[in-house]
Image (cartoon, rainbow, N blue to C red):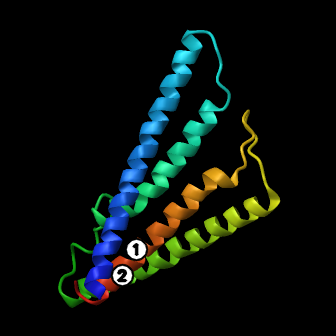
Amino acid sequence: MLNKLDIYLKSVYKFSGYVAAFFLILVAIFILTGIASRIFGFYIRGLAEYSGYCMAASSFFALAYTFVEGGHIRITLFLEKVSGNKKNILEIWCLIIASFYSGYLAYYFLKMLKISYEFQERSEGADEILIWIPQISVALGSLIFFVCVFHQLILRILNK
């Protein structure tokens, strides 16, 4: 059962990476459209805001995928000096701390999303979009990242 869950979660992280890439492509499209619109003398409202929302979505959806693939910068100064059981204990301790803070981050992003939805808060940009709509991607990406870090903690405890 744990093996099936492990395979499923890894596919979720990979899909999250694809979603991040999609939003990164949208950032490029919005920026290029904004440049082209200025060249041809017309203005499309909200392109800068939408590219910012897509950049935030891309960043948060990419967190889990890059963590699993080892793409995050990790401070290994102390881990290189120890070996064996001490290294395993130190890695577990680091993953516990990372799980706590990523869970804290996910909780408060979800809370922020809920509050923005309840108050129907709007952005301050030219488009005045309901702010909870772009916040969905940030909250979901941070939640996937928390699950990913906690998953890695469980795998390290089980020595897998």
**At 67% across and 62% down in the image, what residue appears?**
113
Q: Report the residue that reaches farthest toward the top.
A: 40
Q: Which residue is mark 1?
A: 149
Residue 64 location (% of width, % of height): 39, 64
| Element at label 2 | helix
Mark 1 crowdedness (10 Å alpha carbons): few <14, some 14-19, many ≥20: many
Question: What residue type is disc 1 on?
Answer: Val
Residue 32, above or below 89: above
Q: Is residue 33 visible?
A: yes
Q: Which mark is residue 57?
A: none
| Element at label 1 | helix
Q: Is residue 94 visible?
A: no
Q: Report the residue that reaches farthest toward the left.
A: 84
Question: Residue 158 or 25: which is nearer the viewer?
Answer: 25
Residue 52, above or below 157: above
Residue 11 location (% of width, % of height): 32, 66
Number of marks in picture: 2
Question: Residue 64 or 36: which is nearer the viewer?
Answer: 36
Q: Quadrant of the C terminus?
A: bottom left
Q: Which residue is mark 2?
A: 153
Left of 59 or right of it: where is 84?
left
Residue 49 location (% of width, % of height): 63, 37
**At 51% across and 69% down in the image, what residue appears?**
143
Q: CA distance from mark 2 to mark 1?
A: 6 Å
Mark 2 crowdedness (10 Å alpha carbons): few <14, some 14-19, many ≥20: many
Left of 44 or right of it: where is 149?
left
**Where is residue 17, by image quadrant?**
bottom left
Mark 2 in CB contact with mark 1 (< 8 angstroms):
yes
**Where is residue 81, by image quadrant?**
bottom left
Question: What residue type is disc 2 on?
Answer: Leu
